[in-house]
Amino acid sequence: MCARVLLLLSVTGLVLACETGPSSGDYEQAVMQDRVQRDMQMREKESVLPPGRREAFRGLNFYEVDPAYRYTVPLRRFETPDTVMIPESTGDLRPQQRVGEVTVPLPEGPEELVVFRGEGDTPRGRLWIPFADSTNRHATYKGGRYVDLTSTDSDSVVVDFNRAYNPTCAYNPDFACPLPPPENRIAVPVAAGEKRPTFGG
């Protein structure tokens, strides 16, 4: 009977390994593929990099993929979404619709962040969070970063900081990029996603 129990436990362990291992590996591989694609797009002639800076571009930098920074959380929608004017990197203002809030359980503690939907700004019509954290300036772009949200079947969203990316103005200051509002400024580090790019010369 002990042999049968040991065999059952072994088989169960193999099944669990097949169920959890590949999914985690598949997730990491998908994130890495997206990163490679984004890096390649930056090197194309049609990229946002100005011609003079494109030659000095040495590639994108990222934190290691950490599934602990991927969250599926409820989206608490505002009863009456309002449109606010968010300052841009160029000093102008851009309308953004405040859709609701999410609470993300960061390793240092939960943080409440406001979710926006761009007003007439394709493809920014999807849900997104502009955020700043304590990694800005020394490790990530000084103006903060963005993370796009993925909706689930229920009224929840996936907030994946491994897919956080720099605004366009991090590569070309001629672009106008919305800056994170005060309510989305996080005091702790979000050690995930895109870091500052590397330029030579």
Image (spheres, rainbow, N blue to C red):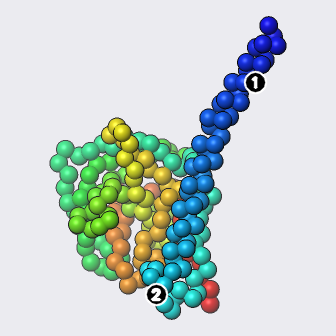
| Residue position for label 1 | 10
Mark sitting earlier along the chain (1/2): 1
Residue visible at 27% across and 68% down in the picture: 121
Residue 138 in sight from this viewpoint: no
Task: Please provide percent x and percent y for residue 188.
Answer: 51, 55
Front residue of this view, candidates 132 and 46 = 46
Residue most extreme to the top:
1
As measured in the structure, the alpha-carbon distance from the residue carrying label 1 to the one carrying label 2 is 57 Å
Task: Please provide percent x and percent y for residue 53.
Answer: 52, 88
User: Which mark is drawn over residue 50?
Assistant: 2
User: Which mark is drawn over residue 78?
Assistant: none
Q: Examine the rendered structure and indicate whether residue 200 appears above or below residue 92.
A: below
Task: State the quadrant of the C terminus.
Answer: bottom right
Tag 2: amino acid: Pro
Residue visible at 17% across and 48% down in the picture: 80
Tag 1: amino acid: Ser
Q: Given contact means CB atoms under 8 Å apart, are the residues at marks 1 and 2 in contact? A: no
Task: Please provide percent x and percent y for residue 19.
Answer: 62, 35
Q: Secondary structure at mark 2?
A: loop
Q: Is residue 8 left or right of residue 56?
A: right
Q: Tag 1: Cα neighbours inside 10 Å, few (<14), some, or many (≥20)? A: few
Q: Secondary structure at mark 1?
A: helix
Task: Please provide percent x and percent y for residue 158.
Answer: 43, 47
Q: Examine the rendered structure and indicate whether residue 172 appears above or below residue 141.
A: below
Task: State the quadrant of the N terminus.
Answer: top right
Q: Is residue 92 left or right of residue 160?
A: left
Residue visible at 23% across and 64% down in the picture: 119
